[in-house]
Image (cartoon, helix red, strand yellow):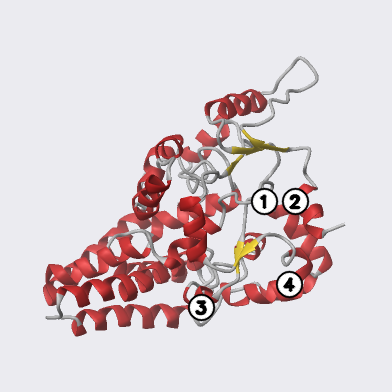
Amino acid sequence: QRLDRILLLSHKESKMGKGGDGNKPTNNKMSILEIEREAKQSQSPNFYWDNGAEPHVGRRAQILKAHPEIKKLMGHDKATKYKVFVSVVIQIMSLHLLQGAPWYTWCFFCYTLSGSINHMMTLAMHEISHNLGAKKVLHNRLLAIFANLPMGVPAAASFKRYHLEHHRYQGEDIVDVDIPTNWEGWFFDSSLKKMLWVLLQPAFYSLRPMFVNPKDPSKWEFINIAFTVVFDSVIVYFFGIGGLLYLFVGTLLGMGLHPVAGHFIAEHYVMHEGQETYSYYGPLNWLTFNVGYHNEHHDFPYIPGKYLPTVRKIAPEFYDDIPHYHSWSKTIYDYIVDPDVDPFARTKRVMMETSEIEEMKARGGLVK
């Protein structure tokens, strides 16, 4: 029997697929959670629904039982701060070197260099949000804000708050804002519209949380804003508004229809029913802190990207036989042209009552 059948079907009784299967308790009484789950599934029938817990807690237990030595890989990566520093310096140097360049040269480097580096900085923020860039939480906070500077807009503090909830409550309706809204699935239903959706991913990733699961700003978000305003002001002073546009537009391009942005789709969009997280084993991992090793990352979020390939080498039986990718560009292409894949191709679950979600909101979320 193939290992992927063990991993992907071990909770087959809870797996429901598109729209849910309408199973109800055998007794006459339904819990509040069951009532709310049924209501949410009926409101969003086009998503994949799973009545079980997110899969990575169970996988983690199985993998550690078979390979306890993996725990030794946990901890921060000392090299992360140097990678971030060099990347920020390259962005500033490119502003200087491109002064007076023709518009077509500016556009080329805005897409290729600024877009790639700024997307790399979003993934540095991702790595650092798990406190993998330094030993102390405070140092990780500051390093994330520094990595955020060349992007032109504040994002590090808010990203941390929502991303850690994505890990803890993967697929949870309302809580996991990584999942598109019903409107996105309804509107972006053709190849042309899906290509537009890919282009607009920066807008959806930044605006969706405000509509789905809004949070009151924390002190760290105000600190993040202050640092960004000061940095942007310095850039405008020395390089003009064109310098700031180079950084900001690079962020938009790098997170939109760009090869590196393929990870947005590759990570969790259901291309094989029954599996909700996918890894990518290709060369762009070099630019992205190995975020492509996404099953490995969700299985072990406290292992830095540097060591995620080692996780796969130690436990190949848990990774090699499940569907994965070798090209993010092809992933984007397949998403756009495949009529069976759209923003609805995500797995959702309801494991929290509305009252629990509201209580977490009142506390400011999982982290502030």
Residue bearing the label numbered 4: 70
Amino acid type, label 3: Trp
For the residue labelled by badge 3, is the local secondary structure a helix, a strand or a loop? helix
Q: Is residue 176 left or right of residue 86?
A: right
Earlier along the polypeptide chain: callout 3 or callout 1?
Answer: 1
Residue bearing the label numbered 1: 275
Residue bearing the label numbered 2: 8
Earlier along the polypeptide chain: callout 2 or callout 3?
Answer: 2
Label 2 – label 1 distance at C-alpha: 6 Å
Residue bearing the label numbered 3: 286
Image coordinates for residue 125, horizontal then vertical, percent: 44, 66
The answer to whether residue 102 of the structure is visible from this angle is: yes
Q: Residue at x 63, y 23 (%)?
A: 35
For the residue labelled by badge 1, is the local secondary structure a helix, a strand or a loop? loop
Amino acid type, label 2: Leu
Image coordinates for residue 210, horizontal then vertical, percent: 37, 42
Image marks 2 and 1: residues in contact by CB distance under 8 Å: yes
Label 4 – label 1 distance at C-alpha: 23 Å
Quadrant hosting residue 41: top right
Q: Nearer the viewer, mark 4 or mark 2?
A: 2
Amino acid type, label 1: Gln
Q: From what the image shows, is residue 338 above or below residue 294?
A: above
Image marks 4 and 2: residues in contact by CB distance under 8 Å: no
Label 3 – label 4 distance at C-alpha: 22 Å
Q: Is residue 17 left or right of residue 181?
A: right
Q: From what the image shows, is residue 72 above or below residue 194?
A: below
Image marks 4 and 1: residues in contact by CB distance under 8 Å: no
